[in-house]
Amino acid sequence: MWNQIKTVILLALLSGIVLVVGYLFCGNQGLTIALVFAVLINFGMYFFSHKLVLAMYRAKPAKKSEYPKLHHMIEEIAHKAGMPKPALYIIPTQTPNAFATGPSPKKAVVAVTEGIMHLLNDKELKGVLAHEMAHVKNRDMLITTIAATLAAVISYLAYMARFAAIFGGGNDRNNNLGGVLGLLVMAILAPIIALIIQLAISRAREYHADATGARAIKDPLSLANALNKLEHGCRTRPLRSGSPATSSLFIVNPFTAGGFVSLFSTHPPTAERIKRLQEMRV
């Protein structure tokens, strides 16, 4: 419940930043433009982003005749959750990973890599599929799409606002928030704050999907074991193609990241996820 409440609060904060930056940039007109811009991009991303992601990773439909065990697992999980069976896709890479995408439970897609099927045993793979089905059930694709889009809008508006401040902009006539200086400070800070909030949302959704998926199959330890294998597997065989901007889709970050960069990870620490799963009672 706390993860759900936190997500709502964080999304509200992101939306507020969009409106504030828009207002500072162009007053009431900028506020309206920012709001319309955010809504239109959210709409487009929500309905079409899954097709772009599948194309980006050259994912192909998993034929039932070739992957009967995979289909049986996902059918069993979907039946227990009272959900439609999602479309299954295979990503041609040895990097062990998986993700869920799609605009709704009826049009959901679960994609797994060739590498994950070689690395995990049946119970662990089932745990991963349950995690991805939890994302579908919790409508995390919608939430993360909105968060990512709002963050992108904020970054764009902040970029424009910096130019306005440098060339003497600022909405001095309509507000008293410091004119050019206030606009410049907000233009620098807003994208950083937006990124931190977006990452917090992504991490909260991962914890929630772990718990939901583990309860669905009544086997948190298999998912914990899978996460441990996937963490090490992705370090050994990180993705060399695709975009780090899509890393939040995957069950663990498929790209290498360490040191200072890890502070801005889209995923919570794997060790903490494993610990929470090991302490679960189902």
Image: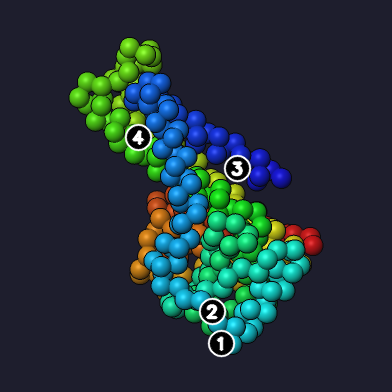
Which of label 3 and label 2 is nearer to you? 2
The reply to whether discs 3 and 1 touch (Cβ–Cβ < 8 Å) is no
Question: Which residue is painted at 50% across and 52% down in the image?
Answer: 46
Q: CA distance from mark 1 to mark 2?
A: 7 Å
Q: How is the image coloured?
A: rainbow
Residue type pointed to by label 2 = Ala
| Mark earlier in primary sequence (4, 2) | 2
- To which residue does mark 1 refer? 66
Number of residue marks: 4
Residue type pointed to by label 4 = Leu
- To which residue does mark 2 refer? 62
Please, which residue is most extreme toward the right here?
282
Residue at disc 3, secondary structure: helix
Q: CA distance from mark 4 to mark 3?
A: 23 Å
Residue 187 figure quarter: top left
Question: What is the number of the mark on residue 157?
Answer: 4
Residue at disc 1, secondary structure: loop
Q: CA distance from mark 4 to mark 1?
A: 48 Å
Which of label 4 and label 1 is nearer to you? 1
Question: What is the number of the mark on residue 7?
Answer: 3
Question: Which residue is painted at 51% across and 63% down in the image?
Answer: 250
Q: Position of residue 214 (x, y in %)?
A: 71, 64
